[in-house]
């Protein structure tokens, strides 16, 4: 080495040694856990591990069984319905609330506190609360009935066809406060003069929002979308608390499928395959976004 | 043209004689308090507020009723007789299927999990963020990118390898193991948070310290830390809320007698056979949600900033 | 006796007894103003004087607490901005970022359901006047500062408005661009001949662009006159000190009777007031402030009459075309402007004389010109 470094400068490796040592946790986590762990799981999804990991390759067997399982299909369907509706309603409700809050109203702090407090709660708490509110015997259904509409039926948690909507209501209750905060921050970043110019031009409020303001908020919308989307795929606690996946399997979701097979049904292989599928879903959403955001920037 | 000097200052350049107001609109446009705009605005906000407050109200109200009153049916009606018995029961006597010690056990478990997890995760992430912001070295950005990407990967994908690692190290099921897990998964957001914050501090301070001969750790403790109180508070709020509310890690990485409050709560409510004591369940739920709620109400603005900061990924 | 008819005949915009308070803070106090048709009026003042507030009231973006606003004989006090016949150019231009220049210009018209051929005609006309035809398909982010300003003006042009409002449109630009665009705005006014109301804190812009200037302070108009009068006969000390760079010299003293004549006395030195055009009789004993501009103090060879005094050179500031000489006399230090070729050493004794025909006397208490 010394022959190639006539100035006697120390080896590059030892520069900033302290910083490198201090970064070891981060490097370990990134490499071993995130990268390594993911690869390991994907790798073992091609085995037929049961209680313990086994290096017994079975090709795509686990995946075939996965997609043949009605429980998995239901969980995917639920995720799709829940995901799309959750996305749309979160954005719409969140934006509407933010637009209202942006009108220089009194009691802004009070309203914001009210809209955001559910976000501070655990999904377990949220799930249990809404389990109670939607309870057919004591909850909304019975109250409306006692008010006179005796044929009113709103029993999502015991109706396999609409149970996913019950979960949706609870999730929106918890999550829209955050979307509202993000949207409000975005709205407040809009140049005041744009509003004035639109007013002088005679453009009605709703058109100003739709055609001028929202397009200007594109980055905020995208960030919010990514945040909501990554939360959707992970939905687990809420389902466990609110319905335990029921009635039957009607409110099954992929995250719960993974957990049940990994830790309770003693079928690691299935669990790995299912979690790899979850990973794929996330990748499909995140990779194009990342490319747009960062690939574009590097070029431009 | 009138001689300028005879005019008073407020009517400069204007013929004072015709200063009387013409008839017609003058001053503020009359606005009714109850204008359509205000009704729609405050009305919608109030309806929305009700949607958000209702469940909380229902919980509180139910938890203060005796069971006979609960069975009467109307969850929206306030208690005719307020009783704190459900609360006492939830705390000290509720049965989880294993024991009947109530939630108090879970509460202290959560506390025991929370404190070290918060401390370690913030300590590690702040140092990493500091290293990334001020001490760039080759490959640092790459590791950071992997970290950020990792934030999007569903936990389930990485969970089993972690179980294996912890088992090998002999700490699977222990408090230490859980603390490590929380540190691992808190890293992406927290490191990002700290990195951005440290990068926003004036770089001259750092340079001056280096010229003075200070090293990595000295600068961290003597210069960076004292200036970083706001971001540490934000990080703490994020972690306290996130870790206290966690369920998945609590259920995978603990043993039944070290279950955190959230896991216990779920067991109490969802796996009890026989008669469901709704009022006790509601009290238990409120108890579990109390800690993060209190943190939220006390920290208000900072909480919002923390969320927004944590949400600015990538 | 003037009556209401006079409002319409010469005035394009009239303000009557306009007041605006935010809570207990009075931002505008009892303003009265008549702006003539086709006039370029500048509202000049430092930040917080109320000039932007006044402009926003005229535009309809702010509501006055009291008073009325007339535009072309119509009482528009309760009208929405779009119904007032005004166009506005903002400091940040506020072009819609996602739309092309063409769309920016036509958007308001589309919303008003103007027929397409008419829209195309007006856009083409505005683009021609402002010479932005090649930019029509571009987005604001691709334009330079000067181009953006022209598009912002174009937005007002296409709506065929009576009055143009400018809210400090040049403040965000660098000095060179500022002087270029200043000239363009002046040319535009000469070709369009619309009434234009222009807000700025820059006195150069005010002096070069305005037909009349309204200098404002604390929500009150201090003086409304054409630039020359404001420069040469400021109505009070504030206006005198605000306009003119380098600023006017101020000497505090009093009026005394010396042998039947009233003279200005400061620190035991008397200055003759011959030639001063007072608005009324001068009385001895009055405490006053004498104001003289640097170019109206003559030194040595430039003296063409007037009482001669002797002073000592304190500091010399060569500025290229001119020199600014700081002289000490009668206990005061005053600045004098001389030609750049002449140089003086510090400590040199010089002769000086004030040109009293161009000087100003202000009452020490009221600060009004006397």
Image (spheres, coloured by chain):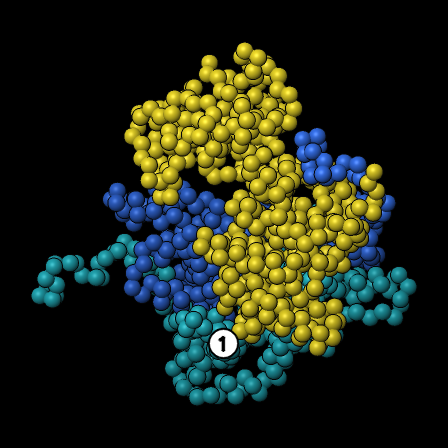
Q: Which chain is blue?
A: B
Whether residue C302 is visible to the viewer of this picture, yes or no, is yes
Q: Looking at the image, which residue is at 31% across and 35% down?
A: C343
Q: Position of residue A93 (x, y in %)?
A: 68, 64
- Residue C355 position, x and y percent, is 49, 29
In yellow, which chain?
C
- Asked if residue B250 is positioned above or below residue C57 in the image, the reply reads below
Q: Tell me if A48 is positioned left or right of C110 in this view.
A: left
- The residue under the point 56% across, 21% down is C288
Instruction: Point out the residue furthest to the front here.
Output: C305
Q: Residue furthest top?
A: C259
What residue did someone put label 1 on? A288
Residue sitting at 41 percent across and 35 percent down?
Answer: C337
Front residue of A183/C173: it is C173
Q: Which chain is cyan?
A: A
Left or right of residue C256: residue C22: right
Q: Is residue B160 above or below residue C202?
A: below
Looking at the picture, tell me which residue is in the foreground, B310 or B170.
B310
Quarter of the image with the C terminus of chain A in it: bottom left
Residues C89 and C348: in front is: C348
């Amino acid at each position: 080495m010394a022959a190639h470094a006539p100035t006697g400068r120390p080896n590059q490796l030892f520069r900033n040694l302290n910083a490198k040592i201090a970064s070891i946790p981060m490097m370990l986590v990134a490499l071993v856990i995130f990268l390594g762990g993911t690869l390991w799981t994907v790798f073992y999804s091609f085995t037929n591990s049961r209680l313990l990991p086994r290096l017994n390759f079975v090709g795509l067997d686990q995946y075939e069984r996965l997609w043949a399982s009605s429980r998995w299909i239901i969980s995917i369907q639920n995720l799709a319905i829940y995901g799309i509706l959750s996305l749309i309603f979160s954005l719409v409700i969140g934006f509407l609330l933010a637009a209202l809050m942006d009108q220089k109203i009194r009691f802004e702090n009070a309203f914001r506190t009210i809209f955001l407090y559910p976000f501070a709660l655990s999904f377990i708490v949220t799930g249990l609360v809404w389990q109670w509110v939607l309870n057919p015997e004591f909850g909304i259904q019975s109250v409306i009935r006692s008010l006179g509409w005796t044929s009113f039926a709103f029993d999502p948690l015991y109706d396999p066809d609409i149970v996913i909507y019950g979960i949706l209501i609870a999730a929106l209750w918890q999550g829209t406060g955050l979307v509202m905060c993000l949207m409000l921050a975005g709205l407040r970043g809009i140049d005041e003069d744009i509003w004035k110019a639109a007013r002088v031009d005679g453009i009605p409020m709703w058109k100003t929002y739709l055609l001028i303001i929202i397009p200007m908020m594109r980055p905020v919308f995208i960030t919010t979308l990514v945040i909501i989307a990554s939360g959707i795929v992970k939905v687990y606690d809420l389902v466990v608390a609110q319905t335990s996946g029921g009635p039957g399997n009607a409110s099954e979701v992929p995250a719960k499928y993974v957990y049940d097979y990994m830790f309770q049904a003693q079928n690691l292989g299935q669990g790995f395959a299912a979690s790899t599928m979850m990973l794929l879903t996330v990748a499909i959403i995140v990779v194009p976004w990342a490319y747009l955001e960062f690939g574009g920037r590097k070029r431009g | 043209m009138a001689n300028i000097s005879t005019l008073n200052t407020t009517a400069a350049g204007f013929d004072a004689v015709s200063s009387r107001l013409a008839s017609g609109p003058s001053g503020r446009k009359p606005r009714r308090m109850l204008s359509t705009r205000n009704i729609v605005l405050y009305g919608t906000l109030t309806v929305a507020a009700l949607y958000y407050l209702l469940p909380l109200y229902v919980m509180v109200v139910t938890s203060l009723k005796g069971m006979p009153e609960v069975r009467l049916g109307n969850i929206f009606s306030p208690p005719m007789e307020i009783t704190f018995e459900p609360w006492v029961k939830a705390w000290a006597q509720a049965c989880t299927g294993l024991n009947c010690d109530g939630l108090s056990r879970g509460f202290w478990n959560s506390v025991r999990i929370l404190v070290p997890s918060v401390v370690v995760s913030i300590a590690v992430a702040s140092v990493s963020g500091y290293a990334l912001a001020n001490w760039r070295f080759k490959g640092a950005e790459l590791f950071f990118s992997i970290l950020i990407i990792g934030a999007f990967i569903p936990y389930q994908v990485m969970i089993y390898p972690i179980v294996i690692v912890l088992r090998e190290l002999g700490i699977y099921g222990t408090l230490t193991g859980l603390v490590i897990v929380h540190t691992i998964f808190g890293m992406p957001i927290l490191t990002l948070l700290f990195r951005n914050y440290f990068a926003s501090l004036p770089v001259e301070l750092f340079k001056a310290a280096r010229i003075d001969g200070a090293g990595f750790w000295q600068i961290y403790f003597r210069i960076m830390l004292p200036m970083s109180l706001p971001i540490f508070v934000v990080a703490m709020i994020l972690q306290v809320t996130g870790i206290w509310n966690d369920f998945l890690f609590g259920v995978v990485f603990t043993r039944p007698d070290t279950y955190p409050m959230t896991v216990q709560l779920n067991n109490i409510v969802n796996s009890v056979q026989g008669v469901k004591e709704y009022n006790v369940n509601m009290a238990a739920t409120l108890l579990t949600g109390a800690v993060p709620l209190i943190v939220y109400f006390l920290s208000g603005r900072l909480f919002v900033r923390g969320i927004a900061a944590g949400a600015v990924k990538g | 006796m003037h009556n209401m008819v006079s409002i319409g005949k010469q005035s394009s915009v009239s303000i009557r007894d306009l007041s605006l308070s935010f809570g207990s803070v009075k931002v505008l106090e009892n303003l009265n103003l008549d702006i003539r048709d086709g006039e370029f009026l500048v509202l000049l003042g430092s930040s917080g004087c109320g000039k932007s507030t006044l402009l926003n009231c005229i535009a309809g973006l702010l509501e006055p607490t009291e008073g009325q606003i007339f535009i072309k004989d119509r009482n528009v006090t309760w009208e929405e901005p779009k119904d007032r016949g005004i166009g506005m150019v903002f400091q940040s231009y506020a072009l819609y970022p996602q739309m092309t220049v063409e769309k920016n210009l036509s958007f308001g018209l589309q919303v008003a359901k103007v027929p397409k051929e008419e829209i195309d005609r007006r856009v083409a006309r505005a683009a021609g006047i402002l010479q932005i035809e090649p930019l029509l398909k571009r987005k604001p982010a691709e334009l330079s500062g000067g181009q953006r300003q022209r598009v912002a003006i174009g937005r007002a042009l296409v709506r065929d408005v009576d009055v143009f409002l400018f809210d400090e449109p040049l403040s965000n630009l660098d000095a060179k661009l500022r002087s270029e665009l200043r000239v363009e705005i002046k040319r535009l006014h000469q070709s369009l001949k619309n009434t234009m109301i222009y807000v700025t804190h820059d006195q150069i812009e005010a002096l070069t662009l305005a037909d009349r200037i309204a200098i404002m302070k604390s929500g009150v108009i201090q003086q409304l006159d054409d630039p020359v009068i404001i420069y040469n006969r400021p109505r009070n000390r504030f206006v005198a000190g605000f306009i003119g760079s380098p600023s006017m010299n101020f000497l505090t003293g009093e009026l005394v009777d010396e042998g039947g004549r009233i003279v200005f006395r400061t620190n035991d030195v008397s200055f003759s007031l011959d030639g001063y055009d007072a608005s009324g009789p001068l009385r001895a004993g009055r405490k006053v402030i004498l104001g003289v501009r640097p170019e109206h103090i003559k030194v040595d060879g430039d003296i063409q009459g007037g009482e001669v005094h002797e002073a000592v050179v304190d500091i010399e500031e060569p500025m290229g075309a001119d020199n600014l000489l700081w002289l000490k006399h009668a206990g005061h230090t005053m600045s004098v402007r001389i030609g750049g070729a002449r140089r003086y050493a510090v400590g040199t004794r010089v002769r000086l004389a004030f040109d009293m025909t161009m000087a100003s006397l202000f009452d020490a208490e009221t600060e009004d010109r006397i």
